[in-house]
Amino acid sequence: MGSGYDIGMSHDPIAESVLAFLREQDPEAGAILAAETERQATTLELIASENHASPAVMHAMGTCFTNKYAEGYPGARYYGGCVHHDELETLAQERAKRLFGCEFANVQPHSGAQANAAVFLAMLKPGDTFASLELSDGGHLSHGLKVNMSGKWFNPVHYPLHYDKGHERFEQIDYDAVEEVCREHKPKMLMCGYSAYPRVIDFARFREIADTCGALLMADIAHIAGLVAAGVHPAPFPHCDIVTTTTHKTLRGPRGGLIMTNDADLAKKINRAVFPGMQGGPLMHVIFAKAIAFGEALKPEFKAYQEQVVRNAKALASALAGRGYRITSGGTDNHVMLVDLQPRDAGLTGADAEQWLEQAGIITNKNGVPQDPRPPRVTSGLRLGTPALTTRGLGEGEMVLVAELIDRVLGSKGDEGICTQAREEVTQLCGRFPMP
Ligand code: DSN
């Protein structure tokens, strides 16, 4: 049984022969790859920012494009021998532009954090003020955390969620407060787009707010990029000036970053900030895989996949709520949910839950819930997402089963026997839904 949503997702003989080859070439390193292959095949991946890339994307990274320096951009390189690298990077750019409906795309950022850092370098001066959502409310460390460059060298001001339990939009973005923060602080840049926010982002409203204070509007759509590409979440263009993303989460490409804009002047600044401002040689083998992933995302099957991601998230959230867990903001509109463990068991921490579930082969990450009384290494919540399970072909029926397994493990407080039994059931379930 395969996912049925995409190209070649049910069996990968090339990966098997590569593994056999590497085990022969370097038994020590090959054994680690074998173990990780087995781990991924026999566990349920519920980390919202992870996915299982297609065989084409995976193998694209293991090609001769890794051998080349191509500093610069197509047609303007600092090394000879770049003719095919120019073709390739142009192809990746063109596909990204079609996918997200924009005029300019820089496909070179090595990661989402580096894409964001390049935007800071291009658009702000040290000490400039920008507005964002705090990490503890669902933002990202590169959106102004004190220990991150964005918080050390720039001046973040944060806008809130609705924290009033009685409010109909409890734990959702308080757009009026965003506007107040912008009026008071006059940020040079307003950031939206998050790492742990389960609701639709109103980019049009953000545009109106940015215009009240003359701020640039930047969206980091790292989490929802696949949904946006498939039209399952509203698009940031034409509302946003700059859009950054990763390519490996819902978008299901290789690990990497991407920056887009419709403005030719901003594009020039962004290009200079990525190279030579932030990075040296681009990872051309990864750009090759990005081009392939963008090609996959342009196919109609990708829309069906993303629609199922959202249906699965809703089914999982509803099944967990039915078992006494609180889903923050009352549910999810996208691929991710934040599960507040406290109503189910006041003593249960996210750290314990993550560890016990891993013993049962269910991979999650602890995550603070808004206004979490516990520190980030402990937390009262779990962040769960459905992109990877959906790639494997699990549907809403299986989400109910996954919720039951999660509850059984957590309800037992990680009892060894219960975890072992659940681990066996997880392995069997994984066997019914093989890896890409
Ligand atoms: N670390 C990523 C996540 O898990 O959401 C964000 O960069």
Image (cartoon, rainbow, N blue to C red):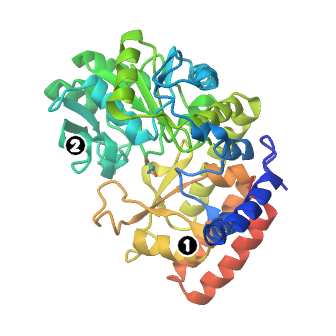
In this picture, residue 410 sits left or right of residue 215: right
x 57%, y 88%: residue = 416
Q: Percent from the top left, x then y, of residue 165?
A: 33, 51
Return the residue at label 1.
358
Q: Amino acid at mark 1?
A: Glu
Q: Can I make out residue 380 in this image?
A: yes
- Vertical placement of 233 versus 322: above or below? above
x 39%, y 38%: residue = 114
Circle 2: is it few (<14), some (14-19), or many (20+) Cα within 10 Å?
Answer: some
* SS type, badge 1: helix
Q: Percent from the top left, x then y, of residue 250?
A: 58, 42
x 73%, y 54%: residue = 392
Q: CA distance from mark 2 to mark 1?
A: 33 Å
Q: Can I make out residue 209 in this image?
A: no
- Vertical placement of 3 versus 46: above or below? above
- In the current view of this chain or complex, which residue is farthest to the right? 1
Picture quarter containing residue 188? top left
Q: Amino acid at mark 2?
A: Gly
* SS type, badge 2: helix
Q: Percent from the top left, x then y, of residue 395?
A: 73, 53
- In the current view of this chain or complex, which residue is farthest to the front? 80
Q: Nearer the viewer, residue 363 or 93?
A: 93
Circle 1: is it few (<14), some (14-19), or many (20+) Cα within 10 Å?
Answer: many
Q: Nearer the viewer, residue 235 or 35?
A: 35
Q: How many marks?
A: 2
- Vertical placement of 135 versus 343: above or below? above
Q: Percent from the top left, x then y, of residue 262?
A: 45, 14
| Of callouts 2 and 1, the N-terminal one | 2
- Vertical placement of 257 versus 400: above or below? above
Give the quadrant of the N terminus. Answer: bottom right
In this picture, residue 413 sits left or right of residue 285: left
Disc number for residue 151: 2
